[in-house]
Image (cartoon, rainbow, N blue to C red):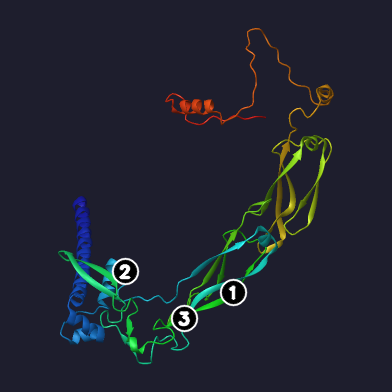
Amino acid sequence: MVFYQKCFSKSRHHSRAVFSSLRSNLVKFKLISQAYEVLSDAKKRDIYDQGGEQAIKEGGSGSPSFSSPMDIFDMFFGGGGRMARERRGKNVVHQLSVTLEDLYNGVTKKLALQKNVICEKCEGVGGKKGSVEKCPLCKGRGMQVHIQQVGPGVVQQIQTVCIECKGQGERISPRDRCEVCGGAKVTREKKIIEVHVEKGMKDGQKILFHGEGDQEPELEPGDVIIVLDQKDHSVFQRRGHDLIMKMKIQLSEALCGFKKMIKTLDDRVLVITSKAGEVIKHGDLKCVHDEGMPIYKAPLEKGTLIIQFLVTFPEKHWLPPDKLPQLEALLPPRHKVRVTDDMDQVELKEFDPSEQGWRQHREAYEDDDDGPRAGVQCQTA
């Protein structure tokens, strides 16, 4: 008995959910039908444009309350109904070329911009006062809306920019248009803005000028966004707060020590020292703390200067043969190799990748299905 009661309870609950869903769908369908009825009937649509929902009711439609036929379609299908004009103009983006020195020291640059401003002659009206009229084709919406029935009880809303007013929702007779702006309501003006690049700013960082974008009637101007574009530097590379540079040193300096000078991005000179006996190998990295980039918004703090050393070896035959034993005596002993008769001795030559024979051999090797697909690299120590 308990089992049947549970089944009945679940069934009753499920039925209520189904009926609730059906009721909701019927309400939605009714609202869509009402909206379609207004939008598809030119006369009813004109009545609605003039007096809204109340005018439709008084006109005899007897429709229940709903906000706007286009709002109904927005609710179910998305998109704008009556032309939803933007309240804010578009942002304007400009690139500003800067050097690494600019980002290190900070700099102020002037940038000339062309922007739209409200016409002073007509004060943004576009023509004589009283000459602006609502577009008769789109009824001031700026958009033409077409409703297409694609199936039983299913409609599709298609919006296009009004061909008469070009999306403005209003028009001015050519004879009444402003002689300065030609009815455009805005004119072009040159504006100089000062861009303050602060210490520690980065490549790609944005600087915002609020409200300096193009002006349009009844719209809040957008912003001007300056994007920093850093040029490559001949010495330093930036990585976050750190600066990286490469420094060439001779073999004698790598083995016996050196003093080197580095000119910084703010024209100071740093002297770095490698003491005798501190051997520096090719590719070694050393660093100087607090000599990297200033940290943005904390310019008294700096990152690290990282130096990669590239050891330059002497050219061939730089030392007379009779001096080689003396040099060898000063260097760590070489590794001795025991050669036996069953080993093949070959001649070591300079490698030239441009040789025709090597190119043909490489192409044949790479085309071999059984061979590895990666190219061959020859490395020297």
Which element carries disc 3, helix, strand or loop? strand
What residue sits 35% from the left and 75% below the top? 84
What is the three-letter code of the residue carrying label 1? Ile
What is the three-letter code of the residue carrying label 3? Thr
Marks 2, 1: nearer the viewer: 1
Residue 37, disc: none
Marks 3, 1: nearer the viewer: 3
Residue 6, x across and y down, in percent: 22, 54
Q: Is 351 on the left-hand or right-hand side of 375?
A: right
Measure the C-alpha gap from mark 3 to mark 1: 18 Å
Measure the C-alpha gap from mark 2 to mark 1: 38 Å
Residue 79, disc: 2
Is residue 273 among what the camera can see? no
Query: If you read the primary sequence from the N terminus, does the residue marked by circle 2 or circle 1 appear first?
Result: 2
Q: Is residue 234 above or below residue 70?
A: above
What residue sits 29% from the left and 83% below the top? 135
Measure the C-alpha gap from mark 2 to mark 3: 32 Å
Residue at image mark 1: 193
Q: Is 252 on the left-hand or right-hand side of 161?
A: right
Q: Is 325 on the left-hand or right-hand side of 173?
A: right
Q: Count of labels shown? A: 3
What is the three-letter code of the residue carrying label 2? Gly
30 or 214: which is nearer to us? 214
Residue that extends furthest to the top in the rendered view of this protein: 341
293 or 44: which is nearer to us? 293
Which element carries disc 2, helix, strand or loop? loop
Q: Is residue 193 above or below residue 101?
A: below
Is residue 93 among what the camera can see? yes
Query: If you read the primary sequence from the N terminus, does the residue marked by circle 3 or circle 1 appear first?
Result: 3
- Neighbour tally class for label 1: few under 14, some 14-19, many 20 plus, Cα within 10 Å: some
Residue at image mark 3: 187
Residue that extends furthest to the front in the rendered view of this protein: 356
